[in-house]
Amino acid sequence: MFTLPEGLPVELNPLAFLVGTWSGVGVVSSKFVNAEEPIEQKFQQQLTFSVGTGNYITYHATSRLLGLATDGSEDIELPAELGFWHLVRNAESADHGPTLLPGSGEPSIKSAEDLEKLRNERGGFDIEASIIHPSGAYEFYSGQVKAGRIDMRTVPGSHMPGHLVEAGKAWGYAERMYGTLTQEGVNKLLW
């Protein structure tokens, strides 16, 4: 049985299934702007989602590409990703920021009834995620969370530094999917 993490703001209940540390192996498919075909590579990833001090969840991921040597023995450690995920809603005085300015007053979402007002016409909640890489690349995702599943895609305005474009590493967009399931009484996250 799933229980909400202690101290989780009501506003983050739709994202609660993410909270924790998850690891797994999968295949990533990447197609760069100038490439003929996508490149598919087996990878291992560890994700940590933690409750922040406001209306967001902090995301940290470490990854490695598996078996890239001809004998399949060499793994390549990749740079980490860091991000912040939240539900889409209007800004209010209780929110912290910009920069280091504290919020003032009470948040408007204090109950399940308040949260329901954010539900979209598709029955889910609109979300945004900002993910940054040590290279300076910045991915801004928009999507929705519904019934333990997140679908999101980068939006125009995601930042691609010039040095990556010049190196032929520019991409047009990215998509991510995260979902939860319970198998033999154990909660699992798929992505």
Image (cartoon, rainbow, N blue to C red):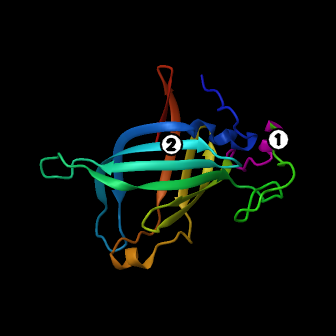
Tell me the kind of residue under disc 2: Thr
In this image, 45 relative to 157: left or right? Answer: left
Start-end of magenta stretch? 112-124
User: What label does residue 188 carry, if any?
Assistant: none
Residue 74 percent location from the top left of the image: 20, 49
| Tag of residue 110 | 1
Amino acid carrying label 1: it is Lys
In this view, 87 is above or below 181: below
Q: Residue at x 56, y 72 (%)?
A: 157
Q: Residue at x 78, y 59 (%)?
A: 90
Residue at 70% across, 65% down: 99
Q: Position of residue 131 (x, y in %)?
A: 53, 58
Looking at the rendered structure, which numbered label has been put on residue 48?
A: 2
Would you say 22 lies left or right of 15 here? left
> Which of label 2 and label 1 is nearer to you?
2
Q: Nearer the viewer, residue 67 or 125?
A: 67
119 part of magenta stretch = yes
Contact check, label 2 and label 1, Cβ < 8 Å: no
Residue 165's quadrant in the figure? bottom left
Q: Quadrant of residue 124?
A: top right
Of labels 2 and 1, earlier in sequence is 2
Residue 76 coordinates in the image, percent (x, y): 27, 53
